[in-house]
Image (spheres, rainbow, N blue to C red):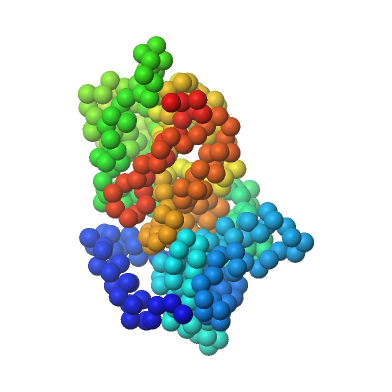
C-alpha cells in the first residue's frame, strides 16, 4: 500500500500553497472540473479495485483489460488512453504515481474501491452531469470504443453528446453558438495575461538568428503566426522586439481576420507596421514559402495525431533550408503532471479528441511527418508544462 492519508493531505496542501495568486488558484479550479470523469472511468474499469487488491505497484499495461485475439495495436491504444486517465487521478491523490506509468494504491484508492463510496460517486456523477453532458458522453463513447482514444475531430465525445457528428467543436460553435468562442477567447487572454509570454523566456538568439551558418542560405526574417487568432501573440512579439527587421504574418480563418481588422479600425488600436493579415486555413497549402519561423500556439493540442500530421505536412512543404516550426504548447513531464496540464488533457480529449503531449508523444508525432525532426524542447519556467517544440527539416544542422 502506498501513502497514508496524512501524507496525501500534506502533498495536496503543498500544491494549494504553490498557487502564487488568486488567479492561479481559479485557473487550477477550472481545470480540475474535467478530472472527475477519469475518476469515474477508473471506477467503471475496476482500476481502483485492482490496485487496492494487488497492493504492490502496477504498470499501466497490467491494468488494461487485454483485448481479444492478441490485438497489439488495440492493446497499445488502450494503454495510452488509460495512462491519461491515471495521470489525471494521481494528480488528485486518488492513486500514487511512483514512476512513469507505474501506479500504487494508497488510502484514498481503498476508499474509491469501496462498493458504497464507488456507488455514491457513480450516483452523483451520472445524475449531476446528466446523460447529454460531454463528460458523461466521454465515458460512454470510450467504453463503446473498448477504452481507446479513437475519436476524430468531428466524431468524438462532444459531438456524441449533442448528436452533431460531422462538425468540429469549433465549427459548431461558429455556426450555432458563437458565445462559446467569445468565452474561450476571454479566458485564454486572461490566462495569458497572468503568465510570462513566451518571448520573455525564450532566448533571443534562438529566435532571431537562423540555424544556417552559410549566408547564402539565410532566409528573410518572416514570422508566420499560423492560426494566430486575433494576434495577441504577434502583438506581444512585436512589442518585445520593436527593432527586429522582420515581416510578421497573422494567419487565421477569413472571419477571424475580418473581425480582427474591424476591431483594430473601430477601436483605433495601432497595428505594428511589420504586420500583415492573411486569411488562411492551415489544412490547405501554406501560401508563405520559406518563412524563417512558422509558429503555432495551442493549435496541436486541439487535434488528434492524424489532423496534426496534415497541418504539419502543409508547413513542411512550405519550408526551405533554415525554416523552423515553433509549436508553443504543453510538454508534459514524464511524471508528476500539474492539475492544469492533466485537466487540459482531459478537456482536449472530450472536446476535440485531442491531447496534451509529453516528449515521447511529440517525438512520435513529428516522426510521422517524413522530412521533419525535433531540434529541441524548450521549457518555460514554472510547473504548468508550457514550452516550445522546435522542429526543422531532417537535413537541418
- Left or right of 168 in this view: 182: left
Give residue 74's position: percent from left, percent from top.
Answer: 68, 57
- Left or right of 67 in this view: 253: left
**As drawn, which residue projects farthest toward the front?**
56
**As drawn, which residue projects farthest toward the top?**
216
Q: Residue at x 50, y 85 (%)?
A: 117
- Left or right of 29 in this view: 349: right
**As drawn, which residue projects farthest toward the right?**
69
Q: Quadrant of the C terminus?
A: top left
Say whether residue 306 is visible: yes
Q: Residue at x 54, y 70 (%)?
A: 58
Give residue 185's position: percent from left, percent from top.
Answer: 37, 48
**Among the 4 quarters of the image, the one containing residue 46:** bottom right
Q: Is 284 rendered above or below residue 86?
A: above
Give residue 30's position: percent from left, percent from top.
Answer: 37, 62
Q: Residue at x 54, y 42 (%)?
A: 365
Amino acid at each position: 500500500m502506498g501513502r497514508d492519508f496524512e501524507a496525501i493531505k500534506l502533498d495536496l496542501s503543498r500544491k494549494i500553497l504553490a498557487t502564487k495568486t488568486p488567479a492561479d488558484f481559479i485557473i487550477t479550479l477550472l481545470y480540475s472540473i474535467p478530472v472527475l470523469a477519469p475518476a469515474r472511468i477508473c471506477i467503471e474499469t475496476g482500476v481502483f479495485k485492482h490496485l487496492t487488491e494487488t497492493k504492490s505497484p502496477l504498470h499501466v499495461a497490467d491494468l488494461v483489460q487485454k483485448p481479444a485475439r492478441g490485438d497489439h495495436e488495440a492493446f497499445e491504444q488502450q494503454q495510452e488512453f488509460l495512462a491519461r486517465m491515471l495521470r489525471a487521478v494521481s494528480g488528485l491523490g486518488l492513486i500514487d504515481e511512483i514512476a512513469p506509468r507505474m501506479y500504487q494504491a494508497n488510502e484514498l484508492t481503498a476508499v474509491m474501491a469501496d462498493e458504497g463510496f464507488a456507488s455514491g460517486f457513480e450516483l452523483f456523477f451520472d445524475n449531476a452531469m446528466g446523460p447529454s453532458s460531454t463528460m458523461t458522453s466521454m465515458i460512454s463513447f470510450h467504453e463503446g470504443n473498448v477504452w481507446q482514444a479513437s475519436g476524430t475531430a468531428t466524431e468524438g465525445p462532444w459531438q456524441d453528446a449533442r448528436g452533431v457528428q460531422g462538425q468540429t467543436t469549433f465549427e459548431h460553435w461558429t455556426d450555432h453558438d458563437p458565445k462559446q468562442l467569445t468565452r474561450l477567447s476571454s479566458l485564454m487572454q486572461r490566462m495569458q495575461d497572468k503568465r510570462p509570454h513566451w518571448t520573455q523566456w525564450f532566448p533571443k538568439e534562438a529566435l532571431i538568428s537562423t540555424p544556417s551558418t552559410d549566408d547564402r542560405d539565410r532566409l528573410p526574417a518572416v514570422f508566420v503566426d499560423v492560426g494566430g487568432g486575433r494576434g495577441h501573440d504577434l502583438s506581444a512579439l512585436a512589442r518585445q522586439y520593436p527593432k527586429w527587421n522582420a515581416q510578421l504574418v497573422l494567419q487565421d480563418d477569413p472571419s477571424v481576420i475580418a473581425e480582427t481588422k474591424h476591431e483594430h479600425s473601430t477601436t483605433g488600436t495601432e497595428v505594428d507596421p511589420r504586420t500583415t493579415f492573411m486569411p488562411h486555413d492551415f489544412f490547405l497549402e501554406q501560401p508563405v514559402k520559406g518563412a524563417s519561423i512558422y509558429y503555432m500556439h495551442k493549435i496541436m493540442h486541439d487535434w488528434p495525431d492524424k489532423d496534426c500530421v496534415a497541418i504539419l505536412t502543409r508547413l513542411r512543404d512550405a519550408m526551405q533550408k533554415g525554416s523552423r516550426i515553433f509549436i508553443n504548447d504543453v510538454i508534459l513531464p514524464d511524471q508528476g503532471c500539474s492539475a492544469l496540464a492533466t485537466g487540459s488533457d482531459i478537456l482536449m480529449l472530450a472536446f476535440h479528441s485531442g491531447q496534451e503531449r509529453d516528449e515521447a508523444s511529440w517525438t512520435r508525432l513529428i516522426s510521422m511527418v517524413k522530412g521533419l525532426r525535433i531540434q529541441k524542447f524548450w521549457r518555460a519556467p514554472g510547473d504548468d508544462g508550457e514550452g516550445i517544440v522546435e522542429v526543422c527539416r531532417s537535413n537541418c544542422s
